[in-house]
Image (tube, rainbow, N blue to C red):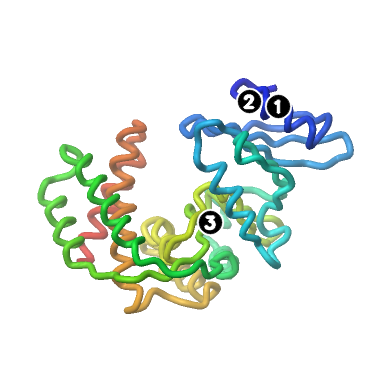
Amino acid sequence: MRQGITEEQSRLLTSWLGEFSVVQDYSWPLQDTNVLHVATPPGEEFIVKASITSHHIHREIAAHAGGFDGLHGRVPTLRHASAKAGILVTEFLTGILVEGTPAEDDPETYRQAGELLARIHRPAGDSSTYAKTLTIKTRAWMDRAHGLLPESQLESFEQELEALRPGVVQLAATHGDYQPRNWLQDNGQIKVIDFGRADRRPWVHDLVRLSHQQFVHRPELADAFYAGLGRTVGPADADMWRLENLNQAIGTVVWANQMGDTAFEEAGRNMVERVLSCA
């Protein structure tokens, strides 16, 4: 078994799948998560994810527990899981990643992605604490951003936070990392993978990355996505949309700097500038 898989995880995997072979290793070193594409002699293929430290395993198991009605074949199907042992097995989805292919520039990709997200976004109740908690987290990122961003930008962030009054927030089951690196294209059909960042959040959370990446200077992609989604960010969402953008922008800068990812850090700086320029 691959290094990093514990004896307990290995035992569970063998009890679930029997004999299997590793087809490809997609592990995430930065997140201490083993991700393996495996095959069994009957011809079945699976994705195995295992970690004893990453919270992403628990989030993905919880996301599947919530159900994906009507999305069989468009999202992974959970076959086996143990939150205690930190391991899960899903059916393998065929297709190639959209990121870096012509499909990433095709409006039809975004229309389908929007349709899928609308079905993933199941209502998950209201929260009177979500906005307050996210504001605290954003200020924690700001404390760690001194020396990484100009003080003038940090002051603007504080002014922005002070001005927001989101109140009670409607939550949904969100994907958490909704972008082309987590979409597959299979003969024209779009599929969604990796629910390791799934959680109960405002629906607009899943739109932030796209708005700062693929949608920049590409209104036709944004229009196709929102047409599939069946809704757009409106006045009622304005404060939470602002707060989510502030949080993800400054969080990107600090996290990328911590990881030594200079390209992603620069992308975060661009996010910060873009967010503040829209004030």
| Residue nearest the viewer, comparing 249 with 56 | 56
**In the displayed structure, would residue 183 be above or below residue 44?**
below
In front here: 78 or 206? 78
Dot 1 falls on a residue whose secondary structure is: helix
Residue 35 appearing in the image: yes
The spot of residue 69 in percent (x, y) is 68, 66
Do the residues under discs 1 and 2 have CB atoms within 8 angstroms?
Answer: yes
The disc, 2 or 3, on the residue closer to the chain's N-terminal end is 2
**For residue 208, side relative to residue 247 (left or right):** right
Instruction: Kindly report which numbered mark, 2 or 3, lies closer to the viewer in this rendering.
Output: 2
As measured in the structure, the alpha-carbon distance from the residue carrying label 3 to the one carrying label 1 is: 37 Å
Q: Earlier in the sequence, mark 3 or mark 1?
A: 1
Q: Secondary structure at mark 2?
A: loop
Determine which of the numbered discs, if any, sits on residue 270 in the image. Answer: none
User: Is 39 situated left or right of 249 in this image?
Assistant: right
Note whether residue 100 is visible: no
Residue that mark 3 sits on: 104
Mark in front: 3 vs 1: 1
Which residue was labeled with disc 2? 5
Q: Position of residue 92 (x, y in %)?
A: 72, 46
In the rendered image, the quadrant that contains the C terminus is bottom left
Spatial CA span between label 2 and label 3 = 34 Å
Q: Tag 2: residue type?
A: Ile
Residue at 52%, 62% in the rendered image = 173
Name the residue: 87% across, 34% down.
Answer: 41
Q: Residue furthest right?
A: 42
Q: Residue at x 29, y 50 (%)?
A: 137
The numbered mark at residue 10 is 1
Few, some or many C-alpha atoms within 10 Å of disc 2 (few <14, some 14-19, many ≥20)? some
Badge 3, how many Cα within 10 Å: few under 14, some, many 20+? many
**Circle 3: residue type:** Glu
